Image: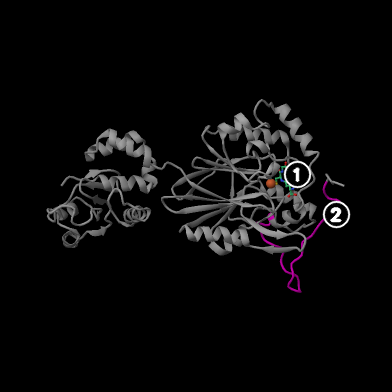
Amino acid sequence: MKPIPVTQKLSVAAQLQPDDFQELSRLGFKTVINNRPDGEEASQPGTDAEAAAAKAAGLDYVFIPVTSSSMTDSDVRRFAEAIVASDGPVLAHCRSGARSFYMWVLAGDVDVQGFSDDKLVAVASNIGIAPDASRAWLATHRRTGKPDVKGFYDSRTGSIQYVVSDPTTKRCAIIDPVLDYDEKSATTKTEHADEILGYVTDEGLTVEWILDTHPHADHFSAARYLKEKTGAPTAIGAHVVDVQALWKDIYNWPDFPADGSQWDRLFNEGDTFKVGTIDARVMFSPGHTLASITYVIGEAAFVHDTLFVPDSGTARADFPGGSARVLWKSIQDILALPDQTRIFTGHDYQPGGRKALWESTVAVQKHSNPHIAGQTEESFVALREARDATLPMPKLILHALQVNINGGRLPEPESNGRRYLKIPLDALEGAAW
Ligand SMILES: N[C@@H](CCC(=O)N[C@@H](CS)C(=O)NCC(=O)O)C(=O)O
Ligand SMILES: [Fe+2]
């Protein structure tokens, strides 16, 4: 028996014999994980004998039998959880140690992220896996920051809401959820938010974050509703306080706390967080609003109202606090991400009646977005301002901002139990007669 160190906490080994367990205890191990189904070969002691030997040696023992072809996500998660739960070093074994090693790589925990492929190949070769074989396996199986992204389209407002999840830990973030609102009858509904919750339940996800990219001008945010339903923290860009300051004047709300306290976290430029094991980073992307941010989650960037899919150009920059020149700069920062970065936009207005689209890449944007390809800052500002001069205000801007600067809270009910919106007259330019 020869434990092969993988990390400070985890070593792997080939098949153990019951006599080995006392030695493992002496070496300081606290837990043994057996990844080998019983009966693979006649000489195998089997899980009952191993469990008894572990008990006699004072070791915790976990049986997660797998084969390389039948290993499931839930096996991998149990494996990762057993390592975390152990109060000291863990020895995992199968026949050769390879399956246990591969399970650890698949678990994609914080430790494995610090390993380059070369370093993993070196550990694998200590276990007896040929470098060609481990390299080929890593190329197809290693998940490095690749979230699953599911978009939900709201045709009423042309908005895309996202659930971004880490396939290894099943943890997720919800981005820009919509609270349904019919302006003709002033009725609110939670159909879209409930559809998102249904997906979260069906996929067995745990919501870690409820994120907004900016205070939306065209729909109500469902962040508050989803926080009530899931308990997950809400977040938005730190410059939301500037947007709050602007709009509290417009709504004449002198007592409104324009301090961002309506969210659990305010993100600054460069702030990092995690979605499961996937690294996430915040970039300020002002221009459409003062508070707009981009969430870069693994290899996916959620850019909301900056770039749209290429045939739809870019977002408008004429709302209070908006600036075409600042938007150009924010777009350049997004385009400086690696070419293969997946770009997910927040709106699609289905030009020409085509089906709704929301995904592109940095490379595709550079080559085929007419607001980018061949444009200079000056030409972009000119085209953006000319187009913005033709656009009427979003029909819900005055309805939506009073809810969205308040973190997605509807106005408090009045004495009759009814909630009322407040609409300032003659407050905005850009009337379309
Ligand atoms: N017709 C929509 C327009 C919404 C709108 O102005 N959307 C913004 C993003 S919040 C935008 O950038 N639109 C670009 C465009 O319409 O070209 C509405 O009334 O809600
Ligand atoms: Fe917007």
Seen from the viewer's position, the closer of residues 59 and 389 is 389
**Predominant secondary structure, magenta span:** loop
Q: Which mark is residue 244?
A: none
Tell me if residue 256 comes above or below residue 335 in the rendering: below
Q: Quadrant of ligand 1?
A: top right
Residue 47 lies in quadrant: bottom left
Seen from the viewer's position, the closer of residues 263 and 395 is 395
Residue 289 visible? The answer is no
The total of numbered circles placed on residues is 2
The amino acid type of the residue labelled 2 equals Leu
Rendered residue at 28%/43% (across/down): 6
Coloring scheme used: one colour
Rendered residue at 62%/31% (across/down): 368
Within 10 Å of the Cα at label 1, are there few (<14), some (14-19), or many (20+) other Cα atoms? some
Residue 73 position in % (x across, y down): 37, 53
129 magenta-colored: no
Report the magenta residues as a range. 404-428
The answer to whether the residue bearing label 1 lies less than 8 angstroms from the nearest atom of ligand 2 is yes
Residue 190 lies in quadrant: bottom right
Q: Which mark is residue 319?
A: 1
- Which residue is tagged 2? 425
Q: Give the CA distance from mark 2 to mark 1.
A: 16 Å
253 horizontally vs 283: left or right:
right
